Amino acid sequence: METPTQPAQEEEIEEISVDVTEEGQVWLHGRDWELLMSPEEARLLGESLLDAADDAEEATE
């Protein structure tokens, strides 16, 4: 994974929605994309996002 060397240009923030399908999958979706995950995959993604957020906060302190 590459580390950005410059801050990203200001972009419009896209809304991300999270729903549960009738089949019990987690449906993460935006305006023109979607991702279906099992509950376990969604948990792993959530944990990874929390870890990355912690790392980002520590890097700015």
Image: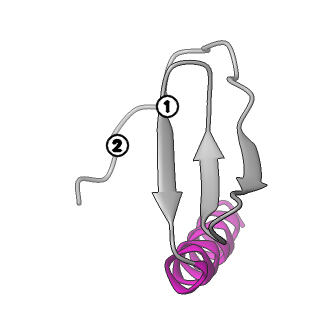
In x, y percent, where is residue 29? 61, 38
Q: Amino acid at mark 1?
A: Pro
Say which residue appears at 40% left-offset and 32% top-offset.
Answer: 6
Quadrant of the image occupied by residue 24? bottom right
Q: Which residue is mark 2?
A: 4
Q: CA distance from mark 1 to mark 2?
A: 7 Å
Q: Amino acid at mark 2?
A: Pro
Magenta-span inclusion, residue 53: yes
Mark 1 residue element = loop
Say which residue appears at 71% left-offset and 37% top-offset.
Answer: 16
Disc 1 packing (10 Å; few <14; some 14–19; many ≥20): few
Quadrant of the image containing the C terminus:
bottom right
Q: Residue furthest left?
A: 1
Magenta stretch bounds: 39-61
Quadrant of the image containing the N terminus:
bottom left
Question: Which labelled disc corresponds to residue 54?
Answer: none
Front residue of 15 and 9 = 15
In x, y percent, where is residue 26? 63, 63
In x, y percent, where is residue 34? 50, 38
Question: Which labelled disc corresponds to residue 7?
Answer: 1
Say which residue appears at 23% left-offset and 53% top-offset.
Answer: 2
In x, y percent, where is residue 51? 60, 79
Say which residue appears at 61% left-offset and 19% top-offset.
Answer: 31
Disc 2 packing (10 Å; few <14; some 14–19; many ≥20): few
